[in-house]
Amino acid sequence: MKRQISVVIVVIAAAVVAAVALGAPSKLAAKPSNASPPTISGSAQVGSTLTADHGNWNGSQPISYQYQWRRCDGNGGSCSDISGQTDKTYVLKPVDQGNALRVRVVALNTDGSTGATSVPTAKVTAAASTTSTSSSNGCPSGAAGSTVAVADVAPPARLQVNSFAPTPGVILGSTQSYTIQVKVGDTCGQSVSGALVYATAVPFHQFSIPAEGTTGSDGSVTLSFSRESGFPATAKQQLLVMFIRARKPGDNVLAGITTSRLVSVPVRLHG
């Protein structure tokens, strides 16, 4: 009987040892492991913001991440930590010019931690020049067809209303509201962002007058109008005439690089 008990104890002990032995690798395997390295997005230019992505990781959840930005030589080697720069984002400074940046990410969970480092950015270039206009023609630097900031356009260059697109394309007797998309450029052939655009139906009181809108990165803005008691202006109205003005913020509405244009939208009151 004693021998049987001893055999049972030995079997149980062996099972416990085996379970512990098998369990140890499983615990180690739950520690974070990198499936794809961290990446950096953003322009490598002084003054620009770089943003780190931690990459993809395997391991037991949840996983948290720590970041450390590193300054390297122009080829991405000889890197050293940048003191205090442990956020997901980093604003490039003059000292970074001519160097490349990397970010090191440490992934942590209850089973341990593992680090991985991104590939380097391109070599950091100087900040964009704040003086971009030509003293002779007022045109901002940039090829025709590009988008420039309204602040960089100066006389004798001027703004111009390049196009407008109404929705709906025909104003009906039942129409209660409509929109127009206005595209603003300059006399240098560039689209202009940041311009203030005002528009109204003429005569007044046919449709509401929205607040000035600001052109976006493609040089366009959309303005919305609601019907008022003055529409239609006559029982035989066939066009809705609109006055559109584009200007630089701070400029006099009758001076500077301001421009204006009269356009029309077809009206069909019957049928």
Image: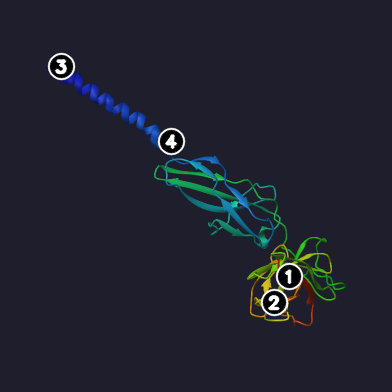
Q: Of discs 4 and 2, which sits in the foreground?
A: 2
Q: Position of residue 32 (x, y in %)?
A: 46, 41
> As displayed, is residue 64 above or below residue 262?
above
Question: Disc 3 on helix, strand or loop?
Answer: helix
The residues tagged by marks 2 and 3 sit, at their Cα atoms, a distance apart of 109 Å
Amino acid under disc 1:
Val
Q: Of discs 2 and 3, which sits in the foreground?
A: 2
Amino acid under disc 4:
Ala
In the picture, residue 201 is in which quadrant? Answer: bottom right
Q: Are marks 2 and 3 in contact (CB under 8 Å)?
A: no
The mark that comes first in sequence, 1 or 4, is 4
Q: Are marks 1 and 2 in contact (CB under 8 Å)?
A: yes
In the shown orientation, is residue 110 left or right of residue 144? left
Q: Nearer the viewer, residue 111 or 215?
A: 215
The residues tagged by marks 1 and 2 sit, at their Cα atoms, a distance apart of 9 Å
Q: Position of residue 90 (x, y in %)?
A: 59, 58
The mark that comes first in sequence, 3 or 1, is 3
In the shown orientation, is residue 252 left or right of residue 72? right
The mark that comes first in sequence, 4 or 2, is 4
> As displayed, is residue 23 above or below residue 171?
above
Amino acid under disc 2:
Pro
On the image, numbered disc 3 is attached to which residue?
A: 3
The residues tagged by marks 4 and 2 sit, at their Cα atoms, a distance apart of 75 Å
Amino acid under disc 3:
Arg
Q: Position of residue 203 (x, y in %)?
A: 73, 81
Q: Are marks 4 and 3 in contact (CB under 8 Å)?
A: no
Q: Hey, which residue is sitting farthest right in the picture?
A: 136
On the image, numbered disc 2 is attached to which residue?
A: 232
Question: Disc 1 on helix, strand or loop?
Answer: strand
On the image, numbered disc 4 is attached to which residue?
A: 29
The residues tagged by marks 3 and 1 sit, at their Cα atoms, a distance apart of 107 Å
On the image, numbered disc 1 is attached to which residue?
A: 267
